[in-house]
Image: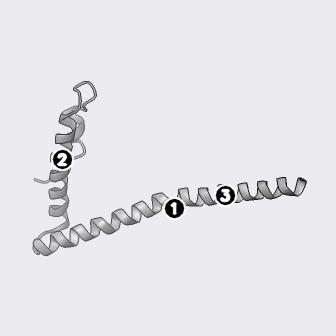
Amino acid sequence: MHKKNVTKAVVKTKAKARLRRVATMVPFAVAVAGVYFEERDFNEWMAENPDGTLKQYLCEMAELSSEFLDDVLSDLPEKVRPSEDMLTEFVPDCS
């Protein structure tokens, strides 16, 4: 009976270690995928805008993201909707 309990404890410890490894790998994998997709989108944009710059790309993405965010936030109740001033702090100066 004692050997069975020891074996169960070892298996449980190994399972916990495996879950910890997976839990630490997931954020890294998400970050790598994000970088990959962003680079691919930038390269596609550069193919369509050969004279474009990184700053122009970032400004265009910020503008599109801002429009999307405005649409999403406008559907929220006013009590929980962030102020316009708070949102404009995160938009880069593209002038």
Residue at the spot 80% in from the left edge and 58% down from the top edge = 7
Viewer-closest of 64 and 17: 17
Question: Is 4 drawn above or below residue 43 in the view shown?
Answer: above
* Residue furthest right as drawn: 2
Q: Secondary structure at mark 3?
A: helix
Q: Is residue 84 left or right of residue 21?
A: left
Amino acid of disc 3: Ala
Residue at the spot 10% in from the left edge and 53% down from the top edge = 95
Q: Is residue 9 left or right of residue 89?
A: right
Q: Secondary structure at mark 2?
A: helix
Q: List x then y, in percent, for residue 8.
A: 78, 55
Amino acid of disc 1: Met
Q: List x then y, in percent, for residue 11.
A: 73, 58
Nearer-N-terminus badge (1/3): 3
Q: Secondary structure at mark 1?
A: helix
* Residue furthest front as drawn: 1
Packing grade of label 2 (10 A; few <14, some 14-19, many >=20) is few
Viewer-closest of 91 and 79: 79
Amino acid of disc 2: Phe
Nearer-N-terminus badge (2/3): 3
Packing grade of label 3 (10 A; few <14, some 14-19, many >=20) is few
* Quarter location, residue 32: bottom left
Nearer-N-terminus badge (2/1): 1
Q: List x then y, in percent, for residue 21.
A: 59, 60
Packing grade of label 1 (10 A; few <14, some 14-19, many >=20) is few
Gap in angstroms between the C-alphas marked 2 and 1: 30 Å
Report which residue position mark 2 lands on: 68
Report which residue position mark 1 lands on: 25
Q: List x then y, in percent, for residue 50.
A: 11, 75
Q: Which tag is nearer the camera, tag 1 or tag 3? A: 3
